[in-house]
Image (cartoon, helix red, strand yellow):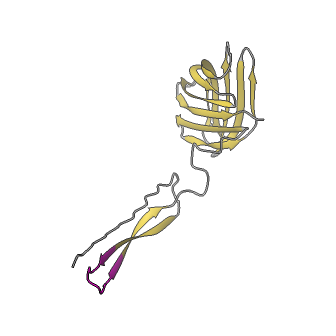
Amino acid sequence: MAAVILAGVAVLPLAACQAGAHTVRTTAAAATTQASTSSSSQVTTTATSATAPVTAPPATVPAGHGTGGPGSLTVSITSPVAVAGHVDTTVTCEAGRRYAETANGVIRGYTVAETVRVAAYHGPGSYPALVTVSVSSSAEGTYAVDAIATTAAITSTGGSLSFSGQTSAGRTLAGSISWACSA
């Protein structure tokens, strides 16, 4: 008589980005199966369950991620405040001998405005760029940097960059921005 033991435990950890997210429970099961090799088969299954708290993902788009379709801005500001998210908005892109991009939107209660300038533009690629960014809210005021040198990755439909610079008050404004030009 041969015995086959099969035990499985499934745990699905999900982490929420926001406090107050819903909590769900999942069941972990262990099953034991025994089989006989004789002409009469006997199968016994025992299932036990245990519950483990798992945090469900937020109902809204996770911070810093979005659909990225035409006319969209995705930001992740890391300093001096944490602001991350996605907004569908007008994104103006002008490409010629120079590349210029401008967008603004409200993300998680903060108004984010940014412009990107690239000289000697000649098509999609990686370029030295100047970025101007401001982040403001009625509760915290405005943090802004003007003409910070960085490197921008420009595509045929948008681009992305990371930046870090000092505000006029001596605070560091840092983060990353991705945009998709409006159609």
Residue found farthest to the bottom: 40
Residue found farthest to the left: 1
Location of residue 47 (image quadrant): bottom left
Viewer-side residue, 108 vs 32: 32
Residues drawn in magenta: 31-48
Q: Is residue 146 left or right of residue 36?
A: right
Task: Say if 169 sits above or below 12 in the image.
Answer: above
The location of residue 72, given as percent across then percent down, is 69, 39
Viewer-side residue, 7 vs 159: 7
- The structure residue drawn at horizontal position 68% and vertical position 20%, both measured from the top left corner, is 123
- The structure residue drawn at horizontal position 33% and vertical position 80%, both measured from the top left corner, is 46
Task: Classify the position of the C terminus by image quarter.
Answer: top right
The location of residue 152, given as percent across then percent down, is 59, 24
Residue found farthest to the front: 39
- The structure residue drawn at horizontal position 62% and vertical position 34%, both measured from the top left corner, is 178
Task: Say if 177 sits above or below 58 in the image.
Answer: above
The location of residue 40, given as percent across then percent down, is 30, 87
